[in-house]
Image: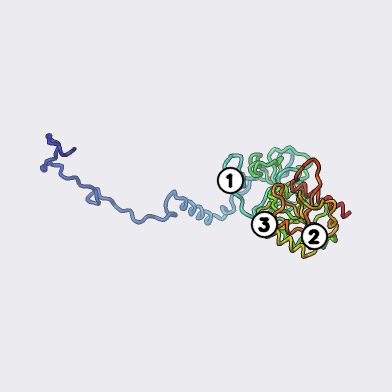
């Protein structure tokens, strides 16, 4: 082994000038010098906490920085989108995946929604939807709908924001926008009892649609549109495991969501029981119903139609709460319809019976 060999020079002699090795160990000139306690995270250069603190200090020192950079004014969209249309920055924090393929953060609860597409935007403007801003793609090809939307935005003094097609694609999560989108505030839901009050003021028997387990917002939008078309007084949706009034629902409703209130129930079964106590007849729609829809004599009185999802149908407790289960007669072995179509057919039959 090294150091045990008897050959010459293998073992260090005691008289060697080099002597024993001395480590630094805090001794003499090579000794380590302490640097004091570890500084705080906000005091370390390059640390995220330090950058955040510096940014906050700059905002506090410069009031103009709090409001962010002033919007740039530039030429309007091609064909006369209006003077002073502002160039909007790319949207951030929109739910879903952008065109870059990177997952974006989910919007905060109660955040504004975007209604996209020329027809939905024009219908929303006609219906008096409380639009906050109008987004117009650069170099958009104008038609009657675009001109009407721009004129309405000018009359209502709405902010008109010019954005690129790529940014509008990202903001609308890849939906078909046709170069036009409108920002609407978060939907304010009514209470189920409010629908009875609306029916009382209308002078007609209450006609309400309740949805059980319908999770597609497009189906909700279609139901709202049918309720508006056939004289209904509102829609009830559960608070959990159900679609809400998102931008997709606004778009499919084609502006009807501004006229038809949507109420949210913490417990749908309890809400149906309260409606029954108020004198409403509750009829559930199901393919295995014991009564055909044309034979529903209660259609002429206060009525609540309960529609379940296409796959699972009505829940057990909701089905037990209904006064009767009715079915829509269908030919050709068709088993079921989606919620939007079923609501349209049932509401038409009720409206026909009411004359």
Q: Earlier in the sequence, mark 1 or mark 3?
A: 1
> In this rendering, does residue 110 appear at all?
yes
| Coordinates of residue 178 in the picture (x, y in percent) | 71, 40
Answer yes or no: do the residues labelled 1 and 3 have beta carbons within 8 Å?
A: no
Q: Secondary structure at mark 3?
A: loop
Q: Residue at x 11, y 43 (%)?
A: 14
Q: Which mark is residue 104?
A: 1
Q: Residue at x 56, y 55 (%)?
A: 63
Left or right: 104 as drawn, with respect to 340? left
Answer yes or no: do the residues labelled 3 and 2 have beta carbons within 8 Å?
A: no
Q: CA distance from mark 2 to mark 1?
A: 45 Å
Mark 1 residue crowding within 10 angstroms, few (<14) / some (14–19) / many (20+): some
Mark 2, residue position: 281
Q: Which mark is residue 239?
A: 3
User: What's the coloring here?
Assistant: rainbow
Q: Residue at x 56, y 52 (%)?
A: 65
| Coordinates of residue 159 in the picture (x, y in percent) | 69, 49
Mark 2 residue crowding within 10 angstroms, few (<14) / some (14–19) / many (20+): many
> In this rendering, does residue 132 appear at all?
no
- Foreground: disc 3 or disc 2: 2
Q: CA distance from mark 1 to mark 3?
A: 25 Å
- Quarter occupied by the C terminus: bottom right
Q: Residue at x 85, y 61 (%)?
A: 203
Q: Earlier in the sequence, mark 2 or mark 1?
A: 1
| Coordinates of residue 260 in the picture (x, y in percent) | 77, 55
Q: State the residue in front, 183 or 221.
A: 221
Q: Earlier in the sequence, mark 3 or mark 2?
A: 3
Q: Secondary structure at mark 1?
A: loop
């Amino acid at each position: 082994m090294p150091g045990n060999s008897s050959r010459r020079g293998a073992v260090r002699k005691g008289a060697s000038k080099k002597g024993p090795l001395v480590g630094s160990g805090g001794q003499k000139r090579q000794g380590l010098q302490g640097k004091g306690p570890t500084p705080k995270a906000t005091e370390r250069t390059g640390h995220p906490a330090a950058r955040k603190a510096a940014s906050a200090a700059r905002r506090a020192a410069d009031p103009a920085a709090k409001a962010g950079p002033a919007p740039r004014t530039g030429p309007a969209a091609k064909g006369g989108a209006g003077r002073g249309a502002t160039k909007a920055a790319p949207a951030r924090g929109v739910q879903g995946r952008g065109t870059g393929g990177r997952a974006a953060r989910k919007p905060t609860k109660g955040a504004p929604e975007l209604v996209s597409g020329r027809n939905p935007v024009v219908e929303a403007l006609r219906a008096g939807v409380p639009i906050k801003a109008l987004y117009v793609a650069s170099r958009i090809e104008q038609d009657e709908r675009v001109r009407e939307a721009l004129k309405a935005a000018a009359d209502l003094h709405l902010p008109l924001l010019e954005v690129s097609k790529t940014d509008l694609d990202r903001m609308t999560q890849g939906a078909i926008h046709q170069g036009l989108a409108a920002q609407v505030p978060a939907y304010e839901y009514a209470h189920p009892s409010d629908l009875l009050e609306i029916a009382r003021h209308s002078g007609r028997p209450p006609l309400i649609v309740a949805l059980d387990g319908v999770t597609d917002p497009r189906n909700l939008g279609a139901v709202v549109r049918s309720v508006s078309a056939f004289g209904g007084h509102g829609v009830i949706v559960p608070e959990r495991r159900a679609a809400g009034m998102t931008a997709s629902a606004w778009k499919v409703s084609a502006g009807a969501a501004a006229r038809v209130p949507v109420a949210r129930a913490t417990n749908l079964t309890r809400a149906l029981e309260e409606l029954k106590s108020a004198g409403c007849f509750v009829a559930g729609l199901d393919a295995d119903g014991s009564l055909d829809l044309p034979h529903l004599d209660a259609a002429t009185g206060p009525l609540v139609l309960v529609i379940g999802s296409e796959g699972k149908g009505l829940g057990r407790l909701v089905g037990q709460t209904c006064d009767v289960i009715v079915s829509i007669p269908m030919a050709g072995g068709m088993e079921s319809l989606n919620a939007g179509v079923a609501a349209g057919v049932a509401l038409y039959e009720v409206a026909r019976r009411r004359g």
